[in-house]
């Protein structure tokens, strides 16, 4: 029996098991996909299990997307460029670290019928998924990307990967076409970013990488002001689809059944 996992901390919010177990059943693959909450000192043992083929593939989420790089044998081009890994697997006795978040984000934005070319984008947060979003935005020919993070030095560190990045203080006002919440603030329903939305009156599209809950307070506040909003569900689905294909060689369907699984959770 094949064994797949998602690791992170916290991890209880993840809908990956429901999704991947559905795809395993639909494609008649004898396997399971589970959650495993780990601490940083558990990573070495976890990757030994992959090396021994006791785990056939894994997704990596907060806060380990950068930490796991030291445990893989080889990075894909996308993972190398972003220094971020969300998918790992064994190939020819080597552990490969890959990044499917880039395609996930790009395809999700295309799904929203929002053209980011020539637009000014603000990203709130500087965590593991942010390099992937920046990489995808530059691929889609944005005019500029600005980062605002509570710990400014963490935002500044991203400039080593992307020279053209602009950094502003948390809560600083400016004019942006699109604002992305890439923080974990919103995983709990009571979470609030405490943004003054009146400062962003020119912004037209608010995006949140969080998909559970479906509508964070960040998105709700934006929607009530008449803005276009989107949660991270389609990014989640597209990055998962790519990971499943890497592990199994099968391209799974994103159909009404899949959407229903996530909506019913």
Image: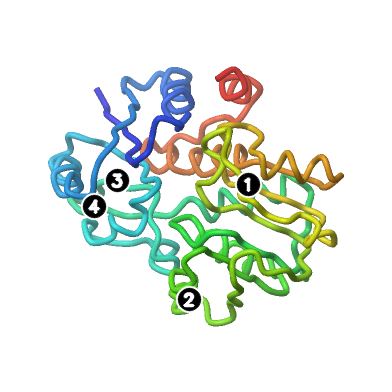
**Cα gap from disc 2 to disc 1, whole angstroms:** 22 Å
Residue at 24% in and 52% down: 95
Q: In which quarter of the image is the C terminus?
A: top right
Look at the numbered discs 2 and 4 and tell me whether their residues touch, using CB distance below 8 Å.
Answer: no
In contact (CB < 8 Å): disc 3 and disc 1: no
> Where, quadrant-wise, is the N terminus in this rendering?
top left
Q: Quick one: SS at disc 3? A: strand
Separation of marks 3 and 2 at Cα, in angstroms: 31 Å
Alpha carbon separation for disc pair 1 and 4: 31 Å
The residue labelled by disc 2 is: 156
Q: Work out whether mark 2 precedes mark 4 in sequence or the reverse, and give the earlier one.
A: 4
Is mark 4 in CB contact (under 8 Å) with mark 3?
A: yes
Residue linked to disc 3: 89
Q: At x 70% / y 42%, what residue is drawn?
A: 219
Give me the C-alpha separation between circle 3 and circle 1: 28 Å
Disc number placed over residue 208 in the picture, else none: 1
Q: Earlier in the sequence, mark 3 or mark 2?
A: 3
Q: Name the residue under label 4.
A: 95
């Amino acid at each position: 029996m094949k064994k797949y996992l998602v690791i992170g901390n916290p991890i209880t919010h993840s809908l990956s098991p429901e999704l991947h177990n559905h795809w395993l059943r639909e494609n008649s693959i004898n396997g399971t996909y589970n959650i495993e909450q780990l601490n940083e000192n558990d990573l070495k043992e976890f990757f030994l299990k992959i090396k021994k083929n006791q785990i056939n593939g894994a997704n990596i989420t907060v806060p380990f997307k950068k930490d796991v790089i030291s445990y893989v044998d080889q990075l894909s081009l996308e993972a190398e460029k972003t220094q971020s890994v969300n998918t790992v697997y064994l190939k020819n006795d080597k552990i490969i670290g890959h990044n499917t978040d880039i395609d996930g984000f790009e395809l999700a934005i295309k799904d929203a019928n929002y053209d980011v070319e020539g637009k000014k984008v603000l990203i709130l947060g500087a965590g593991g998924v942010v390099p992937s979003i920046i990489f995808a935005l530059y691929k889609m020919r944005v005019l500029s990307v600005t980062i605002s993070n509570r710990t400014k030095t963490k935002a500044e560190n991203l400039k080593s990967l992307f020279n053209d990045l602009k950094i502003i203080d948390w809560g600083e006002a400016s004019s942006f076409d699109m604002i992305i919440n890439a923080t974990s603030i919103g995983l709990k329903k009571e979470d609030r970013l405490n943004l003054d939305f009146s400062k962003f009156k020119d912004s037209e599209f608010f995006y949140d990488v969080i998909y559970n809950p479906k509508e964070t307070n960040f998105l709700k506040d934006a929607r009530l002001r008449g803005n276009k909003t989107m949660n991270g569900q389609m990014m989640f689905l597209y990055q998962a689809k790519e990971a499943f294909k890497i592990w199994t060689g099968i391209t799974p369907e994103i159909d009404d059944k899949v959407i229903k699984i996530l909506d019913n959770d």
